[in-house]
Image (cartoon, helix red, strand yellow):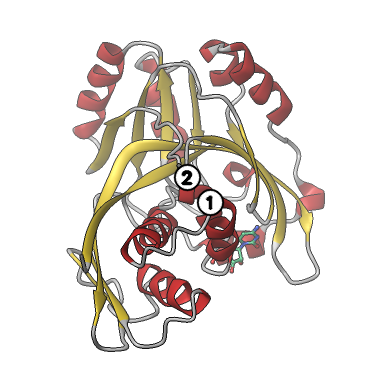
Amino acid sequence: MNTIEVRAWAKLNLSLDVLGKLTDGYHAMRMVMQSVTLCDDLRVSLTEKREFTADTNLRYLPGDERNIAAKAGKVFLEKIHERRHGVHVEITKRVPVCAGLGGGSGDAAAVLRAMNELTSAHLPGAELEALALLVGADVPFCVAGGTALAEGRGERLTQLPPIPDCAIVIVKPEFSVSTPDLFAKLNCAALRCHPDTDGIIQAIREGSLLNLSRRVYNVFEDVLPRGSGEVCALKGALLDSGALGVAMSGTGPSVFGLFAEKAAAEAAAERLRGKVRDCFLCAPMRKIEIDK
Ligand code: C5P
């Protein structure tokens, strides 16, 4: 078998806190991450030629090793000292790009999972996560997904119980955000508000959707350069439609709302589809078992 089909799920930050700057320019994070059913579809192939390529339904994404999915294929083959083959990835993108939803990170993680099967290397989950950090800071979480506390650059993962059943509406304003630019704008010492991440973890452990929802928060909401009015307006629209809690995900600009009832979430999504192009109704995903 030379080709395998896999899915790459989007992620949300139920909380996102930046604790300080590290000596290498990266930032120390503390965040509760959640994977959701919104996903890209991938076909990952081992090729005869030593090349690392990707093809997507979005023409502006790079097709060479600058594509994080192709890069993940290369990192994997180098790890297992396989020097003859290459990797080609075909991606049907549904997760918006540069949107704070971990679209690229999810694709890269899915390639690592696929390569683990295709090559019969069957690296344990912890090794796959260590490899994932070479590709990007959010990739280790995306390897198994589910619900987790992510610390350090994002690679120190503590698994949490699944969040209570809920429906989630994700909306992406029409502008994109550059992650490095937003990190560069961040002055950790000047941040006025921080999320109650411990409170979120406790709410998850207690199975309280209400206590979780009322605490979701992301420090980048205070740093957004432009378009923050649109982010606020969409958060307001989600709350007016019955969301129990709303926040921006990652470095934005996507905003999500947590709903107790699917019918209310459906109605909210319907209403918002009249205002923005990218609006998705989805649900939380459980962790994937790597070490079977
Ligand atoms: O690791 P990744 O390529 O996803 O990170 C994109 C950019 O986000 C980095 O170049 C860095 O500017 C910023 N970043 C950071 N601290 C983190 C994660 C990302 O400063 N923990």
Q: Earlier in the sequence, mark 1 or mark 2?
A: 1
Nearer-the-camera pick, 5 or 229:
5
At horizontal 26% and vertical 30% (from top left) the residue drawn is 272
Q: Is residue 237 left or right of residue 287?
A: left
Query: What is the x, y in percent for residue 46?
Result: 27, 74
Q: Nearer the viewer, mark 1 or mark 2?
A: 1
The C terminus appears in which quarter of the rendering?
Answer: top left
Can you identify the residue that label 2 sits on? 144
Left or right: 3 with respect to 180? left
Q: Is residue 253 shown left or right of residue 70?
A: right
* Relative height, residue 104 to residue 283 (above, below): below
The image quadrant where one finds ligand 1 is: bottom right
Can see residue 276? no
Label 1, label 2: how far apart the Cα atoms are: 8 Å
- Amino acid of disc 2: Ala
Pointers 1 and 2 in contact (CB under 8 A)? yes
CA neighbours of label 1 inside 10 A, class few (<14), some (14 to 19), many (20+): some
Q: Please, what secondary structure does the residue beneath circle 1 have? A: helix
| Residue 96 image offset from top left, x and y in percent | 31, 52
13 vs 57: above or below: above
| Residue 290 x/y as whole percent | 46, 46
| 272 to the left or right of 82 | left
The kind of residue on which mark 1 rests is Gly
Residue 86 quadrant: bottom left
Residue 243 seen in the current view: yes
Q: Residue at x 60, y 13 (%)?
A: 211
Residue 107 placement: quadrant: bottom left
Q: Which residue is mark 1?
A: 125
